[in-house]
Amino acid sequence: MSETEALQKRFEAALMPNYGLPPVALARGEGCRVWDADGKEYLDLFAGIAVSALGHAHPAVVDAVTAQVSKIAHTSNHYLHEPEVALAERLLSLLNTDGRVFFANSGAEANEAAIKLVRRRQGAGRPVVVAANGGFHGRTMGSLAITGKASIREPFGPFGLTSHFVPYGDEAALQAAVTAECAAVFLEPCLGEGGVVPAPEGYLRAAREACDAAGAMLVVDEVQSGIGRTGAWFAYQREGVVPDVLTLAKGLGGGLPIGACVGFGEYGGIFAKGDHGSTFGANPVSCAAALAVLDTIENQDLLANAGTVGKRLAGGMADTSHPLLKGVRGSGLWLAAVLTAESAPRVEAAARQAGFLVNAVQPDAVRLAPPLVLTAAEADEFLAAFPGIMDAAAAAAGHGTA
Ligand SMILES: Cc1ncc(COP(=O)(O)O)c(C=O)c1O
């Protein structure tokens, strides 16, 4: 029995079955490479669901975390500390707002904070939250209530708020849904779990206008799209729209758990003392990691890298003529290879076999969300293997390779 198989057996016996059985047991990583428990090497084009922005074991994160953990690892919210203040200041400066930040530990928690902020501001007289079909905001009861995927949401209802779902990208449907009953609109600037589907140009602007007209709040969920993933600090900035609330997580901590709910301007001042809290939120080690991530993205010009290497990766895949490939969507280092058949799990498996970690985000879409430090040479490595991966996936599906 291999090390991986032995670990899988123990995993199945000790962990709840909600994730199924993961096919790989990762043991270590360096840069964009990871190694499994049996020593097999992979190029990591998934970054742990778009999280490891600087790749694995980046010296800036290792140094920041090591220094912080040896000073003080935890304070609780009864005491403040410099890294949380510095990180909040840094985010507000990147977002160009005089608002305020609440730190959580995950994306779902950042959205829970946003939902409570909305309820606090709007009251029970506006019970409706509008969100998008195909949108994903997390698995906790509040964030799940506004997640637009019925199969994962419906088994857990009823929820404490009324969600109205609209087709993503349809301005007219959004405008019709944002009535005087609507407290807020929650939107991703580009669907992540929905399959890396960018909003059509003007959609966020239309959402802003609809919210302003109805007195609703606009909450933009950049848990996946934020912190450089699209080649900009934040994806919403493309449209020159300013949200009322922004949520962040994933890439912010570069692998350490942290989430943030940012209230812009006056929306930063909604929570009164005692309204919300978290024991681990604003953990000093996670804050130190996040500061290192933001510094490194800036110092090493990783927004530009995400733009140029992302273009190369997208262009190279799109130029691959293969009967299983319909097209490529997304921007920066956040892409989906869209397939002509529901073969994404087969592409993921064939890529893994060839030494690449990618993700079957939808039955017909394969997501790439590599570290922002991915080099052109690493992108080319994948592009060279891509036709063979597609052939292997097509053969496994019995489609032939044409
Ligand atoms: C857009 C978006 N929001 C929220 C979440 C939930 O984040 P977490 O899994 O950290 O709770 C995710 C996770 O994939 C996400 O993509």
Image (spheres, rainbow, N blue to C red):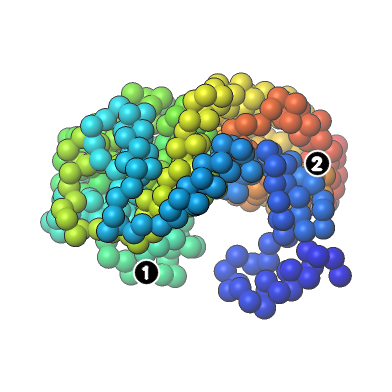
Residue 24, numbered circle: none
Task: Give coordinates of residue 377: x percent, y percent.
Answer: 75, 26
Q: Is residue 258 visible?
A: no
Identify whether 75 is placed above or below 218. Answer: below
Identify whether 272 is placed above or below 21. Answer: above
Task: Give coordinates of residue 268: x percent, y percent.
Answer: 22, 42
* Residue that appears at 28% across and 55% down: 79
Circle 1 residues within 10 Å: few <14, some 14–19, many ≥20: few
The secondary element bearing badge 1 is classed as: loop
92 or 386: which is nearer to us?
92
Residue 389, numbered circle: 2
Give residue 305's quadrant in the image.
Answer: top right
Residue identified by numbered label 1: 157
264 or 192: which is nearer to us?
264
Circle 2 residues within 10 Å: few <14, some 14–19, many ≥20: many
Task: Give coordinates of residue 104: x percent, y percent.
Answer: 37, 53
Q: Is residue 38 visible?
A: yes
Task: Give coordinates of residue 208: x percent, y percent.
Answer: 27, 33
Q: Earlier in the sequence, mark 1 or mark 2?
A: 1
* Residue that appears at 19% across and 60% down: 274
